[in-house]
Image: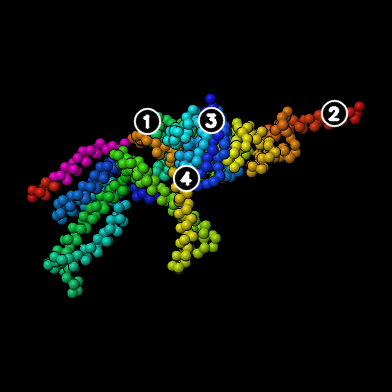
């Protein structure tokens, strides 16, 4: 089945860590370089994120995404290196264009922080089942309705895409041109999108009925089929991350 | 007191003039399998949804009379209470998949989680439902990867796990291929054997004739007849209501084979066979008599 999730099934310690701890890690990984805005915090945090990805044995999976983000960040390096406001020290010249050290360092700071955030999110996305994430959020007090929306998206959207394919084939078999020039495609848009919207509306009504008779609106506390995923050192990890962030704040204030 | 008591049920959808259900009264006992027949727009779906309280609570609209399940009034109790006693399975298996669960096993747990059933109890119920519907082999598959018949049986299992006293099936096989329908009918039979009261709206008359205890014939929102399959399907005015009797009944009607000592026609293959043999032996006996007379 087509799935929208990026989750990679692997056996590793990182996979066993509960989703909440990973969420706390994201928060800490974003907060730390903001609290301590030196270049060193930025690259250390980035390195930690990448090491965790490596421990989760998903580093190869994250390379295309990191590469894509890195490509965009490369343009930042080029632009800042040539045009940063505080540019003074010339590093090298490209023809008659000087490339400055200040701009490079500034751009490196941005790059490390951005890659750090991407890495932290990838840890969550690549090593956590979406359903586990939503379930632990619902346990922590997220409304089950919002939880349902979040977790059903991963399966309902591919279903809708399959419907689009079916409708496209059906319209094509009636002789409609769906490929070719831009004008042809624009003309094909309405006869395609109309049935898609209508059928989704009907599906939604039917699914609403089906959910309602499965107790979706029943008041009172919910139970869970799966036992809560608890990592033995989860709470220790969360507290130590909090301690590091608080420590960083104190460091910033004192120093 | 009967398990299901429907009294003078009238219902009109919002923004319509015509009554979708017009003065329906019937009762059903625990453990019965009741078939509901009638052409499209006869009110089958509306009646099915009235039994769970989706009519009137989901659609609103004008409502009169009462539906009581085990003494509980559906209109007063609302859908969330009614579903603890009555489960419903709809036509389209695809739109009944919640889409929030990754395996069949978890999918069946969806209703139980919302009802707040304890985990241990939940697993027992799911195992029982999987077994009853014969889908144990697929319990770790993704719900959307199943075939139509398997998906519909999963939908039935999801409802059965909630342990209702009554299960309403609204044309559960209308979107399935013959093999899928057969699987679902086998499942419905095993539900009936378990003692669950089944209300089954269906177009496949041969199946209803074989399994149903009683048939309710609906037409334009009215209950025309509520009787045993053989009496309902032997009605001479059946075609006026847009319903076709089982093929066996039509054949026997055409050649005039009645049930032995009764004024109804056979509705199943077995009954038709019995009627044929009875007729045949009567004919051969009488012709022997004739022959015997000639030789005298």
Marks 2 and 1, the one that precedes in the sequence: 1
- Label 4 or label 3, whichever lies nearer to me, is 3
State yes or no: residue A210 in magenta: no
Given contact means CB atoms under 8 Å apart, are the residues at marks 1 and 3 in contact? no
**Chain of the residue that carries numbered disc 3 in the rendered image:** B
Let me know if marks 2 and 1 both belong to one chain.
yes
Provide the secondary structure element on which disc 4 rests: helix
- Which residue is tagged 1? B118
Q: Give the range drawn in magenta.
A: A228-247
- Which residue is tagged 3? B5
At x 87%, y 30%, the residue is B291
Measured Cα–Cα span from mark 3 to mark 2: 54 Å
Q: Position of residue A237 (x, y in %)?
A: 21, 40
State yes or no: residue A244 in magenta: yes
- Which residue is tagged 2? B289
Provide the secondary structure element on which disc 3 rests: strand
- Label 3 or label 2, whichever lies nearer to me, is 3
Q: In which quarter of the image is residue A208?
A: top left
């Amino acid at each position: 089945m087509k799935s929208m999730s990026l989750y990679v099934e692997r056996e590793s310690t990182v996979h066993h860590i509960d989703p909440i701890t990973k969420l706390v890690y994201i928060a800490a990984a974003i907060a730390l370089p903001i609290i301590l805005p030196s270049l060193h915090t930025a690259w250390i945090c980035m390195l930690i994120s990448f090491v965790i990805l490596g421990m989760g044995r998903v580093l190869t999976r994250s390379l295309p995404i990191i590469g894509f983000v890195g490509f965009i960040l490369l343009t930042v390096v080029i632009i800042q290196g040539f045009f940063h406001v505080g540019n003074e020290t010339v590093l090298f010249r490209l023809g008659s264009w000087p490339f400055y050290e200040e701009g490079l360092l500034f751009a490196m700071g941005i790059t490390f922080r951005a890659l750090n955030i991407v890495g932290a999110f990838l840890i969550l996305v690549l090593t956590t089942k979406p359903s586990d994430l939503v379930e632990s959020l619902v346990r922590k007090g997220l409304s089950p309705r919002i939880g349902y929306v979040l977790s059903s998206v991963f399966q309902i959207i591919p279903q809708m895409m399959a419907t689009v394919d079916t409708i496209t084939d059906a319209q094509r078999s009636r002789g409609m041109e769906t490929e070719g020039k831009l004008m042809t495609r624009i003309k094909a848009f309405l006869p395609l999108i109309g049935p898609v919207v209508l059928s989704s509306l009907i599906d939604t009504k039917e699914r609403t009925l089906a959910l309602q008779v499965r107790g979706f609106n029943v008041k009172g506390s919910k139970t869970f089929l799966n036992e809560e995923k608890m990592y033995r050192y989860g709470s220790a990890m969360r507290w130590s991350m909090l301690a590091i962030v608080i420590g960083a704040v104190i460091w910033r204030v004192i120093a | 007191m009967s398990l299901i008591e429907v009294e003078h049920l009238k219902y009109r959808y919002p923004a319509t003039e015509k009554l979708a259900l017009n003065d329906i009264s019937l009762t059903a006992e625990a453990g019965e399998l009741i078939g509901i027949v009638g052409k499209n727009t006869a009110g089958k779906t509306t009646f099915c949804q009235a039994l769970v309280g989706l009519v009137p609570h989901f659609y609103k609209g004008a409502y009169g009379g009462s539906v009581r399940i085990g003494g509980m009034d559906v209109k007063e109790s609302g859908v969330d209470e009614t579903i603890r006693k009555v489960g419903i399975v709809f036509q389209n298996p695809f739109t009944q998949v919640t889409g929030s669960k990754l395996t069949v096993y978890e999918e069946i747990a969806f209703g139980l989680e919302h009802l707040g059933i304890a985990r241990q109890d939940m697993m027992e119920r799911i195992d029982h439902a999987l077994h009853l519907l014969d889908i144990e082999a697929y319990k770790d598959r993704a719900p959307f990867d199943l075939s139509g018949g398997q998906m519909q049986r999963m939908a039935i299992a999801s409802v059965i796990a909630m342990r209702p006293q009554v299960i309403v099936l609204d044309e559960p096989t209308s979107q399935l291929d013959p093999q899928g329908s057969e699987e679902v009918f086998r499942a419905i039979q095993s539900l009936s054997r378990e003692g669950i009261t089944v209300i089954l709206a269906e177009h496949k008359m041969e199946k209803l004739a074989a399994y149903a205890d009683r048939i309710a014939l609906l037409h334009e929102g009215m209950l025309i007849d509520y009787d045993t399959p053989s009496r309902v399907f032997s009605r001479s005015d059946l075609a006026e209501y847009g319903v076709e009797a089982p093929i066996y009944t039509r054949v026997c009607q055409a050649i005039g084979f009645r049930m032995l000592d009764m004024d109804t026609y056979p509705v199943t293959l077995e009954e038709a066979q019995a009627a044929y043999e009875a007729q045949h032996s009567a004919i051969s006996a009488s012709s022997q008599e004739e022959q015997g007379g000639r030789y005298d």
